[in-house]
Image (cartoon, rainbow, N blue to C red):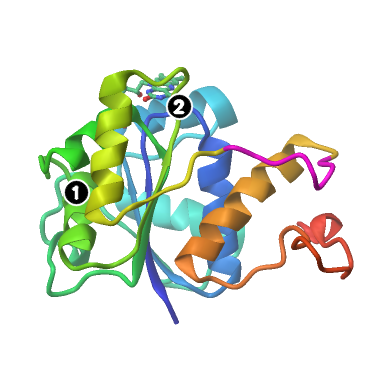
Amino acid sequence: MATITLAFTGASGMPYGLRLLECLIAARCEIYLLYSSAAQVVAKQECALTLPTQPREAERIFTARYGASPGQIRAFAKEDWNAPVASGSNPADAMAICPCSMGTVGAIANGLADNLIERAADVMLKERRPLVVVPRETPLSLIHLENLTRLARAGAVILPPSPGFYTHPASVDDIVDFVVARVLDQLHVPHSLVPRWGETGDDTRSERA
Ligand SMILES: Cc1cc2nc3c(=O)[nH]c(=O)nc-3n(C[C@H](O)[C@H](O)[C@H](O)COP(=O)(O)O)c2cc1C
C-alpha cells in the first residue's frame, strides 16, 4: 500500500484536491492529510465544505464521505512536528500539494519549512522522493515563475491544472478528472479516470460515484 502525503493550500481549485483524495482512497493508498488555514477558507468558498480545525474530526468526516478504511486517512495539524512527514526518517512514498498557492510555492522554493506542509515538501525534496505541485494563479509574475523554476530544479514536478479538451469533457467533473488523472500518474497510483490517448477502451468517466 502506497503512502501519500496530500496537502491542500489556499489556492483556487479545491475540487481537484478533494477528487484526488477520493481517488487515493479508492486506490487503497494510506494518506497523510494536511491543509492550511487558507485552504479552510477556500474549501468553504468553493465547495461549501468545512475543513475542521481538529485533525481527528477531519479524519472522521473524510472517512465517512469517501468510505475509507479505519486508519487509512491520518490528518495532522499545521504545527504537528511529531507527524511522520516532518522527518526524513519516515517520509511518505510521494507527496502532492493540490491546489498549491503561490505563497506555499514561494515558501518551499526558499526552504522556509515554517509549517508542516512546507516541512513535508522540504523533506520530500531532500530525500529525493516525488513531490507533485499543482500551482494555481493567473497570470504568473516573474516571482512566481522563478519560484516554480526553483522547485522544478530541486526535483519537484510542476503540474499546472491545465485540462486538455481533446477528450471532449462534458462536465466540470470531467475537467477535474483530467487534471487529477495526471496527478495520479505522477504519484504512480493506478486509475482509469479518463481514456488514454491512443487507447480504444470504454470511457470510464460515467463510472464515477
Ligand atoms: C477564495 C480564495 C481563492 C484564492 N485563490 C488563490 C489562488 O488561486 N492562488 C494563490 O496563490 N492564492 C490564492 N488565494 C490567496 C491565498 O489563500 C493566500 O495567499 C494564503 O496566504 C495562502 O496561504 P497557504 O499557502 O498557507 O495556504 C486565494 C484566497 C481565497 C480566500
Q: In this view, does 82 lie to the left or right of 117?
A: left
Q: Which amino acid does label 2 sit on?
A: Val
Quadrant of picture, ligand 1: top left
Decide whether the magenta segment is chiefly helix, strand or loop: loop
Q: In this view, does 54 lie above or below 127?
A: above
Mark 2 sits near ligand 1, with its Cβ under 8 Å away: yes
Q: Name the residue under label 2.
A: 42
Q: Which image quarter: residue 86?
A: bottom left
Q: Is residue 89 left or right of residue 60?
A: left
- Residue 32 visible within the image: no
Q: Mark 1 points at which residue?
A: 116
Q: What residue type is labelled 1?
A: Leu
Marks 1 and 2, the one that precedes in the sequence: 2
Question: Disc 1 versus disc 2: distance between alpha carbons?
Answer: 19 Å
Secondary structure of the residue carrying tag 1 is helix
Q: Which segment is the magenta one?
A: 162-169
Q: In this view, does 134 lie above or below 132?
A: above
Residue at image location 52% in from the left, 22% down from the top: 45
Name the image quarter holding the N terminus.
Answer: bottom left
Q: Which image quarter: residue 200?
A: bottom right
- In depth, the one of 47 and 165 nearer the eye is 165
Return the x and y of residue 13 as percentages of the image width and height. Answer: 52, 33
Residue at image location 46% in from the left, 73% down from the top: 70
- In depth, the one of 165 and 99 nearer the eye is 165
Residue at image location 26% in from the left, 23% down from the top: 143
- Residue 198 visible within the image: yes
